[in-house]
């Protein structure tokens, strides 16, 4: 058998085909190379450095993976590329998981990447820091723009999944702590494809209606990839533009997201967010009791102080009145003495007498005495009867 026939037979056996062309086109050769390569080489994990990373509008990404001796072109189709948190920078050391293949049209060897990993949290941390710095530069992380939470909200909105335990926990806590509060649920996806758009849309809907006084945005714990929707720029901007205060509650206490940084307040868990959003009825009752007791004590103390002040004022008034009365008594006595000194009794005491006519009137002039008039002389110690014999 000639070499040509031998290879054709081998190709036929390898490809499971009965009819093998004697003359191949270039496309057939490249397609055969791809089939042989993809069918015989298992999935590989390859380490290298990123070079020339580029994402196209359709979603696929192309880059070169290189080491100090060689390089290979790589492609990530859109489904795999959506999992990347950000574009890897030039020279980043990565590991890719996939398989070698042939780009038929160009006859070029390429590596089809299903997953791209960095050591530790390199790419995820890079994406987080890039967005954090961008939003900080716009002032969206400034503490001065954060709004205070209402102390007694009548309605609390929850932007979360209806399938998670987080919703049940938050509803239970709010109803126990503040049973008078209405709960509005804005159901949304919280992970996977389309989650960032859905979360942002739910926040926007709640903000437009302004039905809730405060909004809790979050979900329970999960992997880094599960929580990544809350590190999306669209969610961050929806929180920043909201017209009502927002509490971010994503994952566990150690999980910090961009949503936490932009929100008006952050709770370590959804349960903690529910406790932060509404007051505790039992605590309010205890506070009211303590306040009533303090008010009663304060009022009693004030009444006691006022009573002491009034008693002191009474004493002062009594003393002042006594002083006034005493002064007026002295003055009256002085006036009485002066009046007494000027009165007839005082004159009599000095040895004078007062002539009184028969009718008791004082005879003041010699013309009041006619000859034979009987009159009385009032002395200091009695009266003397007398008769007028004449006048001079």
Image: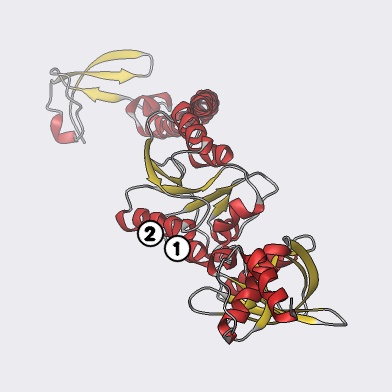
Does residue 206 sit above or below 357 in this rendering? below
Residue 201 image-quadrant placement: bottom left
Residue found at x 19% / y 29%: 363
Asked whether residue 367 appears in the rendered view, the answer is yes
Residue 70 image-quadrant placement: bottom right
Q: Quadrant of the N terminus?
A: bottom right
Q: Quadrant of the C terminus?
A: top left
Question: In terms of depth relative to the viewer, which is nearer, 322 or 164?
Answer: 164
- Mark 2 vs 1, N-terminal side: 2
| Rendered location of residue 278, percent (x, y) | 48, 38
| Rendered location of residue 185, percent (x, y) | 38, 42
Does residue 227 sit above or below 95 in this rendering? above
Question: In terms of depth relative to the viewer, which is nearer, 256 or 178?
Answer: 256
Q: Are marks 2 and 1 in contact (CB under 8 Å)?
A: yes
Q: Residue furthest front?
A: 1
The tag on residue 204 is 2
Residue found at x 46% / y 50%: 189
Asked whether residue 115 appears in the rendered view, the answer is no
Mark 1 burial class by Cα count in 10 Å: few <14, some 14-19, many 20+? many
Q: Which residue is mark 1?
A: 238
| Rendered location of residue 115, percent (x, y) | 67, 63
């Amino acid at each position: 058998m000639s070499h040509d026939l031998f290879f054709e037979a081998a190709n036929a056996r390898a490809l499971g085909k009965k009819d093998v062309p004697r003359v191949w086109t270039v496309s057939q050769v490249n397609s055969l190379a791809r089939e042989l390569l993809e069918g015989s080489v298992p999935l590989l994990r390859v380490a290298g450095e990123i070079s020339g990373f580029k994402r196209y509008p359709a979603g696929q990404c192309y880059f070169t993976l290189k080491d100090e001796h060689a390089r290979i072109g790589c492609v990530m189709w859109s489904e795999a590329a959506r999992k990347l948190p950000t574009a890897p920078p030039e020279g980043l050391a990565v590991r890719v998981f996939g398989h070698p293949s042939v780009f038929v049209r160009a006859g070029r060897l390429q590596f089809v990447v299903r997953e791209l990993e960095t050591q530790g949290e390199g790419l995820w941390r890079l994406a987080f820091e890039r967005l954090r710095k961008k939003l900080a530069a716009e002032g969206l992380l400034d503490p001065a723009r954060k709004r205070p939470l209402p102390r007694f909200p009548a309605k609390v909105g929850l932007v979360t999944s209806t399938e998670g335990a987080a919703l049940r926990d938050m509803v239970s806590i709010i109803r126990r702590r503040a049973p008078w509060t209405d709960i509005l649920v804005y159901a949304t996806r919280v992970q996977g494809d389309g989650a960032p758009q859905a979360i942002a849309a739910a926040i926007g809907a709640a903000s437009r209606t302004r039905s809730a006084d405060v909004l809790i945005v979050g979900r329970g714990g999960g992997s880094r990839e599960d929580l990544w929707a809350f590190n999306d720029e669209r969610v961050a901007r929806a929180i920043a533009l909201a017209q009502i205060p927002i509490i971010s509650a994503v994952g566990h206490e150690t999980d910090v997201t961009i949503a936490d940084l932009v929100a008006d307040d952050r709770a370590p868990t959804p349960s903690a967010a529910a406790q932060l959003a509404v007051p505790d009825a039992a605590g309010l009752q205890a506070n009211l009791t303590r306040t009533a007791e303090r008010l009663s004590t304060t009022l009693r103390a004030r009444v006691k102080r006022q009573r002491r002040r009034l008693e002191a004022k009474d004493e002062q008034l009594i003393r002042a009145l006594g002083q006034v009365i005493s002064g007026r008594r002295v003055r009256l006595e002085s006036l009485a003495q002066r009046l007494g000194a000027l009165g007839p009794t005082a004159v009599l005491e000095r040895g004078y007498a007062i002539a009184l006519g028969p009718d008791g009137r004082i005879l003041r002039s010699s013309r009041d005495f006619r000859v034979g008039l009987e009159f009385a002389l009032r002395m200091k110690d009695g009266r003397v009867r007398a008769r007028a014999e004449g006048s001079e």
